[in-house]
Image: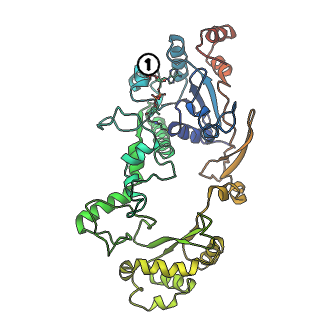
Amino acid sequence: MVSPLQGIKIIDWTQVQSGPSCTQLLAWLGADVIKIERVGSGDPTRNELLDFEGMDSLYFLQLNSNKRSIELNVKTPEGKEILTKLIKGADIFVENLHPGAADSLGFSWEEVHKMNPRVIYGTIKGFNDDSPYASVKAFEPVAQCAGGAAATTGWWDGEYNIPTQSGAALGDSNTGMHLAIGLLAALLKREKTGEGCFVQQSMQDAVLNLCRIKLRDQLMLQNIGVLKHLPEYPSEKFGDTVPRAGNVEGGQVLGWCYKCKGWETDPNAYVYIVLQNEAKAFDEACQALGKPEWITDPKFNTPEARNLVKQEIYKGVEEYTINKDKHEIVDELGKKGVPCGPVLSMLEIEKDESLYKCGTLVEVDQPIRGKYVTIGCPPKFSDFTPEVKSAPLLGEHTNEILKEIGYTDADIDKFRTGHIVCK
Ligand SMILES: CC(C)(COP(=O)(O)OP(=O)(O)OC[C@H]1O[C@@H](n2cnc3c(N)ncnc32)[C@H](O)[C@@H]1OP(=O)(O)O)[C@@H](O)C(=O)NCCC(=O)NCCS
């Protein structure tokens, strides 16, 4: 079995979530990813949100599988020399330190390009260089707020009408996925030109890229003053910016999240149901939901008419869902061609055997923790199955990596004594 990125070497000077999610994906695809970690402490997530003392955190383990780890003090001349040697033999160099940090240590794009003109340089920062916030450090919520997600997520009225974050890591892992696309494109380009390039991915851009339909809404609002697909229409007044949309579907189709049996005690006893616009699909949904009268009633039987009575439709559909189990609903409606899905808790997801069967969830073994569950490689290939391995221990591969670039045992002992490397 040939892995897509077999033979590609990546020097991974990333930490926390955004950068590591990118390099983990590339490692699953077969790249040799060498993670550069701070001497003694490593990636800060190794010790963040610990469930057991003395073990790498689940946070770290979810983001660093299939990599090799070297502890390296890049602030020393010897550390710089080692990193330079590694870059000289690499295809990709990635960093996500705070703005200016890699540059000030002598690893700017210009310097790295001089060291190895073939190397592709990937970088993640909160904001682009031209942004007024270019020098600001960023974490997940910063990006969700600056990229349009927080302003448009959540409830549009009541006590909880406040900017709200998504549970999905739109600022971090989503940025990592964007950078991965950029790096893969740069690799293909290098096949043609023989030269590496600089790929910068800001977290703000990555979030905003997923908020395209919110920009669509902003422009529509400016043009016609209302957003007919939002639950607020037609009874509430629109301001000059896109409001939070609750659980509305992003298109013109009428979607909502409905209570199911057990909702009083189970916060996830909900199902999402979409009523499509096409007459045939709408008719089938009405039959399935026990509302055949909607098919001929002009109050309901066109998308425009339905926009005026959304709240009535939500109530009508909930009469069907409220006493049924969410899985039964999806089973029944799914068979009848109605787009729908259960709200699954993380517990339900973690216990879902079907997700293990298709490699979406995998159990891996780590020397200290033992077995743990992680999310595997999302794309599935016809002729290649990524083998998800455990994340490395801190500095686990220091010796072998140093020997690969020509250092002897005596050199390594000297580095260890000088705290250039550790384990
Ligand atoms: C995540 C972030 C906010 C953390 O900032 P931070 O606490 O200053 O941590 P950093 O790791 O960036 O830098 C800390 C120091 O460690 C140093 N360092 C990192 N790895 C090192 C190594 N292997 N050897 C020696 N020093 C090292 C850095 O050079 C820096 O030194 P300086 O402060 O003297 O410049 C910041 O890195 C950032 O904004 N990154 C870009 C956006 C991003 O990816 N965010 C992460 C979201 S998950």
Quadrant of the snapshot with the C terminus: top right
- Please indicate whether residue 131 sits to the left or right of residue 404 in the image: left
* Label 1 within 8 A of ligand 1 by Cβ: yes
Foreground: 113 or 301?
301
Res. 283 visible in picture: yes
Residue ID at (50%, 85%): 283
Above or below for 27 versus 108: below
- Give the quarter of the image for residue 401: top right
Check disc 1 and report its element: helix, strand or loop.
loop
Which residue is situated farthest in the front direction here?
159
In the rendered structure, the answer to whether residue 23 lies left or right of residue 276 reads right
Res 248 → quadrant: bottom left
Name the residue: 60% across, 69% down: 264
Give how far across and how far down residue 234 sits, in percent.
Answer: 32, 75
User: Can the viewer see residue 281?
Assistant: no
What residue does disc 1 label?
105
Amino acid tagged 1: Leu
Coordinates of residue 93 in the picture (x, y in percent): 50, 29
Instruction: Report x, y in % for residue 98.
Output: 43, 29
Which residue occupies the foreground of this view, 266 or 309?
Answer: 266
Q: Position of residue 10 (x, y in %)?
A: 55, 31
Q: Residue at 66% across / 35% down in the picture? A: 391
